[in-house]
Image (cartoon, helix red, strand yellow):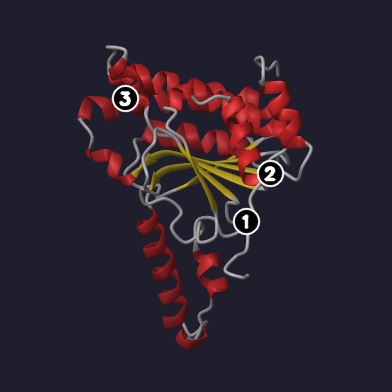
Amino acid sequence: MTTAPGEAELLEAARSQPVPEHVAIIMDGNGRWATRRGLPRVAGHREGVKAARAIVRAADTLGLRYLTLYAFSTENWSRPLDEVSTLMNLLERSVHAELPALMARNARLRVLGRPHGVPAGVRRGIDHVVHETRNNTGLTVLMAFNYGGRDELLDAFRTLARQVQAGDLKADDISEKDVSGALYTADIPDPDLLIRTSGEMRISNFLLWQIAYTELVLTPTLWPDFGPGDLYRAVGEFQGRTRRFGKV
């Protein structure tokens, strides 16, 4: 992958130290990016797809093991119907288009979120790419789609309740490990770093259990303008911190 001026130095600096195993990103600001340019909001979403493609390549180059991208929340269904429809069409095309690149990079796609309520064509496209990349052993790209953190916790609690009801688990014995094992991310390490673009100062119902001790980097950069150099810079900021996990 070719790098823009300055990116090579940022990449080299980030790779000179241990990189985080798992980075999660709240990709925010597509609509504002378009509005500021007098463009329809969908233009921002198209640019956002390009940004996501570049960040997946950059994450692979950096040597991350897991990259989670918050693509579409359960709350996003309440947006205007034409915007949601356009988003679904864009996602369906984009997922198909990314398969060759994922295969070339030995990258794997997984999805976090509820499968029901998703248009059939989008579901088929996502399932196809997930299936085709299932044996790849490089970067795992986790796409949070039709995802909500509270929904994930509810689904986990219901799974545990069924285990208790079946006599496979005692209620008083439920541990943090049991809860983690019932989440969509059961076999995935918690994010080391969470990045949110667009300057908003909130978590937006994202990975609520998993980010208990995750380091946060909040940037005013709108998602379509967020490039590899921004990722490397955020990782560099993470590397300069001391993680105490509640200890001294």
Q: CA distance from mark 2 to mark 1?
A: 10 Å
Q: Residues within 10 Å of mark 1 (few under 14, many from 20)?
A: few
Q: From the viewer's side, name the closer residue of 85 and 72.
A: 72
Q: Amino acid at mark 1?
A: Pro
> Could you tell me which secondary element the residue under label 2 belongs to?
loop
Q: CA distance from mark 1 to mark 3?
A: 32 Å
Q: Position of residue 44 (x, y in %)?
A: 37, 20
User: Visible in this render: residue 224?
Assistant: yes
147 vs 110, left or right, is left
The residue pinned by badge 3 equals 32
Q: Mark 2 touching mark 1, by CB under 8 A? A: yes
Judged from this view, the residue extending furthest toward the right is 16
Earlier sequence position, callout 2 versus callout 1: 2
Q: Which mark is residue 8?
A: none
Q: Quadrant of the C terminus?
A: bottom right
Q: Quadrant of the N terminus?
A: top right
The residue pinned by badge 1 equals 189
Judged from this view, the residue extending furthest toward the top is 38
Which numbered disc, 1 or 3, marks the residue closer to the eye?
Answer: 3
70 vs 38, left or right, is right
Tell me which residue sits at (40%, 63%) in the image. 153
Tell me which residue sits at (61%, 41%) in the image. 237
Q: Residues within 10 Å of mark 3 (few under 14, many from 20)?
A: some
Tell me which residue sits at (51%, 24%) in the image. 51
Earlier sequence position, callout 1 versus callout 3: 3
Q: Is residue 158 above or below residue 216?
A: below
Q: Which mark is residue 65?
A: 2
Q: Is residue 104 above or below residue 237?
A: above
